[in-house]
Image (cartoon, grey):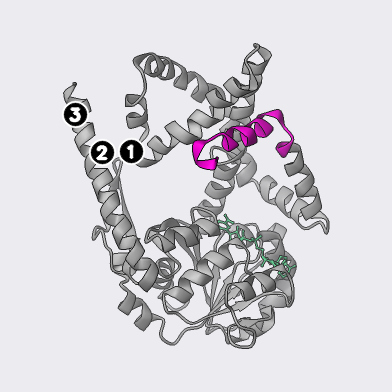
């Protein structure tokens, strides 16, 4: 056995051992909802591949400190979609005072009732909730933030802090018309994942990574407030950004490697295999199943080099030769995408589409097209064949 392989095996068994220990802590957390705020890595200055950045963690805001810091505050969460659900329940489980503001009897109102929010106690209309909040957390969909701004803005006062989870509305104010008042603190905490994951990781005793940014710092405490609130909503570690950088990187990433880019790459590879006579089962397994079930989790857990190392010498040689070819072919596409994000085209398109009264039906019809593609119909059958799904 090579020395490097032996070292890796030891490192892995340590990682697996660490995971086991963590699971035990997790079950105790599920009962108490207190453990994550006590865990700490203790480091604030991290050298990220040669660039030193300051990060904030749960250890910087232990539970008692958080409760004390926010003891006089009420968090008015406006909107109870993906992020409203995740952030709202995490704040509530952390012992903070939260009220939800949504359209009466809409889908979110019903979802909030199911999650135990009580009308008249901590579930209100948008207007009522804003009046009760010292923090107004605008977690409406981005299109809805623009549509409702003319009614929300007059309800805000200088003693409140206005919070977003995306830079979209204020950064592209020429398109959204969301111009935050200048006399109050305006902050952002953007979890790097869906609200469902914000919640599920928190319940497991883990945490989603988030960025934070400050738009207005009237009180001189906007940075501190953002860092504390990021921990309170269940973040793992938090890094600083600006509203502009957050929105550009976020729109770019989801159109690229996170969703659009990876979908396009799966389709291209699958189609070429099918055009060359490969069966659907073979084309799907070589494109998606092996990626999601075997290789991508290795990248997530231990890194890209580990994934290469775990594969055959034949696979390694080929991948090492071909990744620069893909990078060179795709870089111009990413450059176009970044430009389209930065110049507001992506925002314009999103606002125009998502503000249409029938946007849900139109979206559903596009998702139906995806659902009916051969590749994803094959995927459905392949998933059923997994032994754990039998
Ligand atoms: N989802 C993510 O993965 C994610 C990740 C990071 C940051 N963010 C950001 O977090 C914010 C919230 O996103 P989200 O994905 O949680 O939103 P979402 O799931 O689309 O939630 C939509 C919410 O907006 C309400 N709403 C829609 N139109 C409305 C209107 N005209 N008037 C009043 N309420 C209206 C909905 O209420 P009804 O049920 O009554 O329609 C619902 O409560 C956005 O800024 C987003 O960019 C999202």
Q: Mark 2 packing: few (<14 Cα in 10 Å), some, or many (20+)?
A: some
Q: Is mark 1 within 8 Å of ligand 1?
A: no
- Between 221 and 66, the residue placed more toward the observer is 66
Q: Is mark 3 within 8 Å of ligand 1?
A: no
Secondary structure mostly taken by the magenta-highlighted segment of the chain: helix
Q: Mark 1 packing: few (<14 Cα in 10 Å), some, or many (20+)?
A: some
Residue ID for mark 1: 302
- The quarter of the image holding the C terminus is top right
Spot occupied by residue 208 in the image (x, y as percentages of width and height): 43, 56
Left or right, residue 240 beside residue 165: left
**How many numbered circles does the render carry?**
3
Q: Going from the N terminus, do you reach mark 3 or mark 1 first?
A: 3
The magenta stretch is 370-390
Spot occupied by residue 388 in the image (x, y as percentages of width and height): 50, 41
User: Judging from the image, what secondary structure is the residue with disc 1 in?
Assistant: helix
Task: Give the answer, above or below, for where 112 lies relative to 354.
Answer: below
């Amino acid at each position: 056995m090579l020395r490097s392989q032996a070292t890796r095996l030891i490192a892995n068994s340590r990682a697996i051992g660490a995971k086991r220990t963590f699971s035990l802590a997790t079950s105790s957390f599920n009962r108490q909802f207190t453990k994550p705020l006590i865990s700490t890595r203790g480091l604030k200055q991290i050298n990220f591949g040669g660039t030193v950045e300051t990060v904030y963690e749960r250890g910087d805001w232990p539970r008692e400190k958080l409760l004390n810091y926010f003891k006089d505050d009420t968090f008015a969460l406006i909107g109870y979609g993906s992020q409203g659900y995740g952030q709202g329940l995490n704040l509530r489980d952390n012992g903070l005072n939260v009220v939800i503001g949504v359209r009466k009897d809409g889908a979110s109102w019903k979802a909030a009732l199911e999650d135990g929010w009580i009308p008249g106690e901590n579930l209100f209309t948008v207007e009522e909730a804003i009046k009760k909040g010292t923090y107004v957390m605008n977690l409406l969909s981005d299109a809805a933030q623009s549509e409702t701004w003319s009614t929300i803005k007059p309800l805000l006062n200088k003693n409140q802090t206005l919070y977003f989870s995306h830079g979209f509305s204020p950064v592209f104010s020429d398109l959204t018309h969301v111009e935050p008042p200048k006399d109050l603190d305006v902050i952002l905490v953007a979890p790097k994942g869906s609200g469902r994951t914000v919640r599920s990781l928190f319940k497991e005793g883990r945490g989603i990574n988030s960025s934070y940014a400050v738009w207005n710092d009237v009180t001189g405490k906007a940075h501190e407030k953002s860092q504390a609130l990021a921990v309170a909503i269940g973040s793992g570690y938090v890094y600083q950004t600006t509203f502009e950088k957050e929105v550009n990187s976020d729109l770019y990433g989801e159109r690229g490697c996170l969703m659009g880019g990876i979908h396009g790459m799966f389709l291209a590879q699958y189609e070429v295999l099918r055009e060359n006579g490969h069966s659907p089962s073979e084309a799907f397994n070589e494109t998606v199943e092996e990626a999601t079930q075997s290789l991508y989790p290795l990248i997530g857990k231990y890194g890209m080099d580990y994934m290469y190392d775990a594969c055959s010498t034949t696979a390694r040689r080929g991948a090492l030769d071909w990744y620069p070819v893909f990078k060179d072919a795709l870089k111009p596409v990413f450059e176009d995408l970044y430009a389209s994000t930065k110049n507001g085209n992506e925002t314009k398109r999103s606002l125009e589409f998502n503000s249409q009264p029938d946007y849900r039906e139109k979206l559903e019809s596009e998702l139906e097209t995806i659902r009916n593609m051969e590749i994803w119909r094959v995927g459905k059958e392949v998933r059923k064949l997994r032994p754990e799904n039998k």
